[in-house]
Image (spheres, helix red, strand yellow):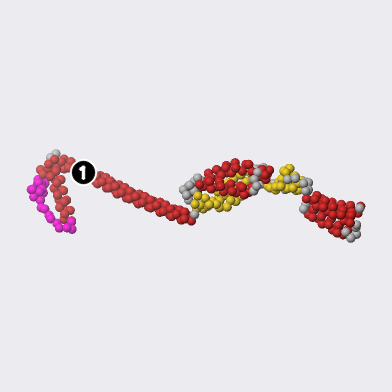
Amino acid sequence: TKMASIMLSAPLVMAFVTPQPIANTRAVALLSRHAIRSTTANPPSMVLGYAVAVATVSLLSTSIRVIGTGDLQLIERLGKYNRKLSPGLHFTIPIFERTSFVATVREQVLDVPPQAAITRDNAPLKADAVVYWKISDPIKARYAVEDLVSAIQNLVLTQLRSEIGKLTLDETFSARQKMNAVMLEDLDRATDDWGVKVTRVEVRDIIPSPDILAAMEGQMAAERRKRANILESEGRRASQVNDAQGAADAVVLEAEAEAKRLETVAEGEALSLKQLTEAAGGDVDKALQVLLLSRYWSTQAALAESPNTKVLFYPSKATVPVSVEGLREMLSAE
């Protein structure tokens, strides 16, 4: 009996010194090995003792619980919730207690697959989403809903279809932030009874049907052509306006130049008439006759230089009141 106690104590010491779960396996293996070796050398009572020892060690090994950081377990005693195991080393009562729920308090990601939906203007499309959530109350998460992940996923799908049905096709592409905010508020409120905290909801992809995609591409192409035509017509109009404005400015400048020229000519003629009047002793009629004669000869010279048919008019008393002789007499009289 003393030898059996010594032989049993060695595996137990090794089991509690060696880390789990290797310790449990080694302890049971050592006890089994010693039991097999002693079956031929020991009486049946000793074999029974070894078997009881092996069973006891096995039960003790199953009672040890090591919980990691960020994880937790719920323990039930005789089918009823008893306690929550936080990170660290814990012991349970074999047979009477069992692990009911194993979970993590870290944030988790739920990828919602693409789901068919219809917009307010009856446009079919597919949409998917990503939900970030974590367990805030593990007791509710275990006992308030049967399948937590499936419940959250179906709730997201229902909410996603509902929000898309409130928008038109064009609004679904521009109102994602609004959809995310509304879905986050509704999902967080709905999952509170399940011990879940929804931290973020993102509508990832919105894919219209192939027919709508083709129609949208045609609409975009037509819109681009429309903008191109508008820009081209605005360019032509601006060019025509610039041309007309340039022509008007040119006419104004030409008219101003002509007016300036006529003004200069008139000033010159007035100065010439003044000087001729002074030379004629104040007789304006004689000064005008001299000036007209000068203009007459200038016109005749211009006609003579023209390459066209020339018609020359010689001065007479009817055409030129003052002839060369008369002009000479006037000058000699002065």
| Position of the C terminus by quadrant | top left
Task: Name the outermost residue toward the bottom.
Answer: 40
Give me the residue at 39% from left, 52% from top: 226
Give me the residue at 84% from left, 54% from top: 51
Magenta span: chief secondary structure: loop
In depth, the one of 23 and 320 nearer the eye is: 23
Local crowd at mark 1 within 10 Å, few (<14), some, or many (≥20)? few
Give me the residue at 91% from left, 54% from top: 3
Residue 174 visible to the viewer:
no
Task: Name the outermost residue toward the top.
Answer: 282
Tag 1: residue type? Ala
x, y percentage for residue 108? 64, 48
* Magenta residue check for 74: no
x, y percentage for residue 64? 78, 48
Number of numbered tags placed on the structure image: 1
Determine whether, in the image, residue 98 is placed left or right of residue 301: right
In depth, the one of 181 and 122 nearer the eye is: 122
Give me the residue at 14% from left, 39% from top: 282
Residue 112 visible to the viewer:
yes
Per the image, the residue denoted by label 1 is 266
Task: Name the outermost residue toward the left.
Answer: 317
The magenta segment: 306-329
Q: Quadrant of residue 310?
A: bottom left
* Magenta residue check for 320: yes
Instruction: Check disc 1 and report its element: helix, strand or loop.
Output: helix
Determine whether, in the image, residue 116 is placed left or right of residue 60: left
x, y percentage for residue 31? 84, 55
x, y percentage for residue 230? 38, 51
